[in-house]
Image (tube, rainbow, N blue to C red):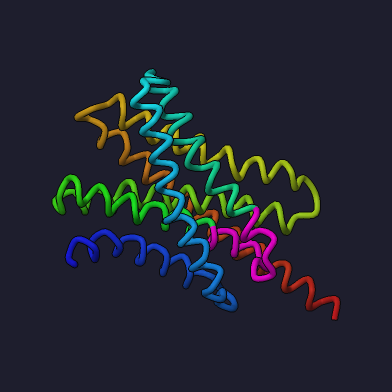
């Protein structure tokens, strides 16, 4: 029970923060829970594909492994379900909602991945995993959701923002995984400033998404 609590707590804390950071009406929970559950379910087919590639010794070069098996594979599935489940849903009615749903699916994925790692490696790694892998998944979700929301609520360049919603998280995830892969014992010194930068950008995206709604709301009021 303790391991389960430790594994889930970081995702609950981050998701609560993202959820409550929305300035106006809070988002209905059913779609958030659905996206979180989809993120959980995604872990198993993705881990199977990664295991198959590793067993067959395909893509042995660190960069290719980081790009295809971590960045592209994981972020594509998140992006796909975010686009075809949340993006078209009526509850997705503000720019900031993209951040909520993007974070939810990412944290669903991160929670099960975190639980499996802690069960395998021990509870001693829980703090490091909360600070780095779980937080990084949440931040990739914030980036993805921000651009997904921008695509939905910006009249022009919709396709460009949808592409950005996929490839910006892919690039960030690839960079994260590649630094951990090639830096061995010194990875923490490389990842820490990278994560600080991601959090700064993430907070900026949260503010911009909230501001976008404020401007839209004020504009609509002037028309009434």
- Percent position of residue 13, x then y: 35, 66
Q: Using the image as rendered, state which of residue 187 and residue 67 is in the foreground.
A: 67
Q: Which residue is at a point 46% across and 50% down the rendered structure image?
A: 42
Task: Give the answer, above or below, for where 5 lies relative to 120.
Answer: below
Magenta region: which residues? Answer: 84-101
Q: Using the image as rendered, state which of residue 219 and residue 71 is in the foreground.
A: 71
Task: Give the answer, above or below, for where 204 lies relative to 52.
Answer: below
Q: Is residue 51 left or right of residue 220?
A: left
> What is the number of callouts on the image?
0
Looking at this rendering, what residue extends furthest in the bottom direction? 224
- Percent position of residue 188, x then y: 25, 37
- Percent position of residue 59, x then y: 42, 21
Task: Give the answer, above or below, for where 190 lies relative to 130.
Answer: above
Q: Which picture quadrant has residue 178?
A: top left
Q: Which residue is at a point 47% across and 41% down the rendered structure image?
A: 74
Q: Which picture quadrant has residue 167?
A: top right
User: What is the quadrant of the C terminus in the image?
Assistant: bottom right
Q: Is residue 224 left or right of residue 5?
A: right
- Percent position of residue 129, x then y: 27, 49
Q: Using the image as rendered, state which of residue 174 and residue 114 is in the foreground.
A: 114
Q: Is residue 123 left or right of residue 139?
A: left
Q: Which residue is at a point 58% across and 52% down the rendered structure image?
A: 81
User: What is the quadrant of the N terminus in the image?
Assistant: bottom left
Q: Which picture quadrant has residue 86?
A: bottom right
Q: Which residue is at a point 42% across and 23% down the rendered structure image?
A: 63
The verdict on residue 152 being magenta is no
The verdict on residue 88 being magenta is yes
């Amino acid at each position: 029970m303790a391991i389960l609590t430790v594994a889930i707590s970081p995702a609950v804390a981050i998701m609560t923060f993202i959820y409550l950071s929305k300035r106006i009406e809070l988002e209905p929970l059913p779609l958030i829970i659905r996206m979180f559950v989809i993120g959980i379910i995604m872990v198993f087919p993705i881990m199977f594909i990664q295991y198959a590639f590793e067993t067959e010794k395909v893509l042995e070069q660190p960069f290719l492994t980081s790009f295809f098996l971590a960045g592209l594979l994981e972020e594509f599935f998140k992006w796909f379900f975010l686009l075809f489940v949340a993006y078209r849903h009526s509850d997705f009615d503000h720019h900031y909602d993209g951040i909520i749903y993007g974070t939810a699916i990412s944290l669903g994925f991160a929670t099960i991945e975190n639980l499996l790692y802690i069960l395998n490696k021990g509870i001693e790694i829980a703090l490091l995993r909360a600070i780095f892998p779980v937080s990084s998944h949440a931040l990739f979700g914030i980036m993805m959701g921000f651009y997904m929301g921008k695509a939905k609520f910006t009249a022009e360049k919709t396709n460009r923002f949808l592409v950005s919603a996929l490839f910006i998280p892919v690039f960030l995830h690839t960079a994260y995984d590649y630094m951990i892969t090639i830096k061995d014992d010194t990875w923490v010194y490389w990842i820490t400033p990278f994560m600080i930068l991601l959090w700064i950008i993430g907070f900026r995206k949260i503010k911009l998404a909230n501001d976008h709604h404020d401007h839209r709301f004020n504009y609509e009021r002037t028309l009434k």
